[in-house]
Structure formats: structure tokens, C-alpha cells
Image (cartoon, coloured by chain):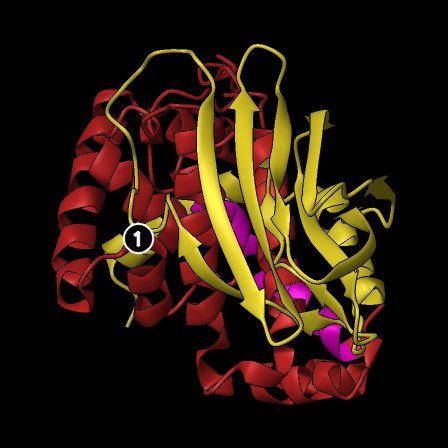
Chain colours: A red, B yellow
Amino acid sequence: MVSDDVVDDGPREWLAGAVAGDRTAWDALVDRYAGMLWSIARAHRLGDHDAGDVIQTTWLRLLDNLERIDDPDRIGGWLATTARRECLHVLRRTKREPALDVIELLAPVSSRDDPDVDVGVLRDERDSLLWTVFDTLSDACRRLLRVMIADPAPSYAEISEALDMPIGSIGPTRQRCLAALRVQAVAAGITMDLG
Amino acid sequence: MTTSEDSLEQRLRIAALHHDPVPSLVTDAAKAAFELRDLDLQLAELVADSWADSGLVATRDHSSTVRMMTFASEGGSIEVDIDHDLATGTCRLHGFVTDAVGDLNVERSDGSVVALPVVEGQFDVEGLERGPARLSVSTSDGRRIATEWISF
């Protein structure tokens, strides 16, 4: 459990705290970037085990380099770059290209016509279907959006490091990919008016 | 201003949180890793890596594949070939160390250590499980040097 004081700080303070040996500051760093690192591993189509290894290796590398991070404000970018390189090494080790692994998808539940189903259930059903449609996007779109939807949302600089992609191309590509997703979602009968 | 794009992205984010959340085991392991911090250990610099700029390989054959890495520090050096066996999911390590005293240790992220005998500067082991690890040795001048963490 991270204390309230630590939660109020940011990556720069957490990094300084970790250098000084503060375990709660380290925990705060992990909590802040866990979602981004998981998204990067998934964007490279790694399964649970390989994704876990990549992320653990990334954190251990940071631990070794805590005192050597030149710009603490770019810690997210440093983690993203390290994770991307490790993903590529795992793909090489397993001789895969980044599109072969399977992410488990939940089959959508067909209850849209039931008048007694409440909005919450419909929303869950829609999100399940949206997640299924998301996996049918082109690999380039799926990779970008998978990193972009990390929670909390990474910065464009971090996305750039995660995917080795120019920052200037992220916005236009995002726009095209979300438009493609919307077309696919509408074709699948997903309604977007449930909030 | 929230656009329809932002709204769709947020719905997708919520779907991801529901269908592909970060496993708690992954987060717990990352937090526990802090206990592995060792300020007395001297990090040897990676000076050569046969996979450094390789990215992905085009081949899809299923034979083992080898990564060659060299680490150096003032106290000594560690050269290691990591031979991945896709059939078993394990790897073989063999290589050389200079100026080492005693065994070469394979340290895992769960805190376990496998000690490998060094004979005339050489070490060799088969059947190592995959996962993060680093190699460390003691040198004749009393230092302990280690490689960076590698995902075997």
C-alpha cells in the first residue's frame, strides 16, 4: 500500500525516493507504469509468461540504473524503450514475428434484445464486443491503440519510445485507427450511446 | 473538449481494463524486486551483444538460437553464449570469465541462485529455465561484479 504523501508526488520524486531506498516510492513507480509496460508487451503480442518476464526484466534494469537516469522526468520513456527492446529479444528468442500469439478474447453475450437487461449489462456486452472487434484491426493500428489505451494513458513521448515511432505520426495514425475501429464497431452492431 | 475519438478511446481503455488487466502477480513481483537491490555489486558494462540491433529475424526455423554477450568492468569480464532450446523452453549457458574467484552465480529474480563451477575460466550449464537472470562473480581484488539482467 502506497502512502498518501507518496501518491501526491510524481515520477521525479518517486525516483529520488527509490534511489534513497524508499520502498513506498518504488511501489508508486511500479503502480504508475505497470499498465503502460503491460500494454507494450501486449502490443508485441506476447503471452502472459513472456510479458511477465519482459516487465520484470525491465524493472530489474531500472533497479540497476536508478542512480544513472539522466532525466528523471523521462523515466516513462526510459522504461518504454527498455521494454520494447526486451519484447523484440523475446520475439527473436522464440522466432516469432509480432502477430502470432493469442490474446484471450471473451465471446460477446447476445442479450441485446432482452428488454429486462439493464444498461450496465449492455455496456459490459458492448465492451466485450468492442474488445473482440479491436483485435481485428490491422497490426499497426492494434499496436498503437494497445499502448495508447494503457491506464493511466501514456504520453506521446512514451508511446513514441514504446513503438519506435515518430511523435508527429502518432496523432494522425491514432485518428485513422480510431476511425477504422468505429467503422468495424458499427458494422458489428455496437451502439456507442450508453455512456 | 471531449471528442468522439476520445470517447471511443476511453471505451476501449475500459474494455482493456476488463478483458486484459495487468496480472497482480506481475505487479507484486516488480515491487518485490526492490529487495534485490545490491549497492555493493559493480555493474559490468555490456560491450558486445550479437542481438543488439537485430530486432526480429525473418527465419521461422525451429532450431535453437544463440545470443552472444560480453560484459566488462575494471574488475574483470564475463563472456556468455546463451543458447535457447525452443523444444524444451530452456537454455544452455557457456562462456568465460577473467580474474574470477570461485563460482559464477546465476541469480534469478525470485532471489534464488545457481552456482556454476568455473574451470580454467570457463563455465557451462544446460537446462536453465527461462526468465530474468543475471550472472555475477567475485574477483581477485575482492569486488563482486554482475551483468545486467537478461531475459533468458
Q: Check the picture and name the quadrant holding the N terminus of chain A.
A: bottom right
The one of A100 and A113 positioned closer to us in this rendering: A100
Image-based side of B13 in relation to A1, left or right: left
Residue at the (58%, 24%) spot, across then down = A117
SS of the residue at dot 1?
helix
For the point 20% across and 67% down, the residue is: A167
Q: Chain of mark 1?
A: A
Q: Position of residue A49 (x, y in %)?
A: 63, 31
Residue B106 part of the magenta segment: no
Indicate the position of residue B130 as horizontal and vertical percent values.
Answer: 66, 31
| A33, A7: nearer the viewer | A33
Which of B75/A143 is in front?
B75
Q: Quadrant of residue B118?
A: top right
Specify the amino acid type for callout 1: Leu
Circle 1 Cα neighbour tier, 10 Å, few/some/many (<14 / 14–19 / ≥20)? many
The answer to whether residue A63 is above or below residue B117 is below
For the stretch drawn in magenta, the main secondary structure is: helix
Instruction: Establish if A8 lies above or below B27.
Output: below
User: x and y percent of residue B107 in the render?
Assistant: 78, 49
| Residue drawn at x 44%, y 25% as measured from the top left | B65
Question: Residue at 21% across / 30% down in the picture?
Answer: A138
Quadrant position of residue B88:
top right
Residue B10 visible in the snapshot: no
**Residue A165 drawn at (x, y percent):** 22, 57
The answer to whether B132 is drawn above or below residue A6 in the figure is above
Q: Is residue A78 left or right of residue A33?
A: left
The residue at which mark 1 appears reads as: A163
Residue A118 visible in the displayed image: yes
Q: Is residue A34 magenta?
A: yes
Tally of marks = 1
Q: Is residue A101 left or right of residue B90?
A: left
Write down the region rendered in magenta: A25-40
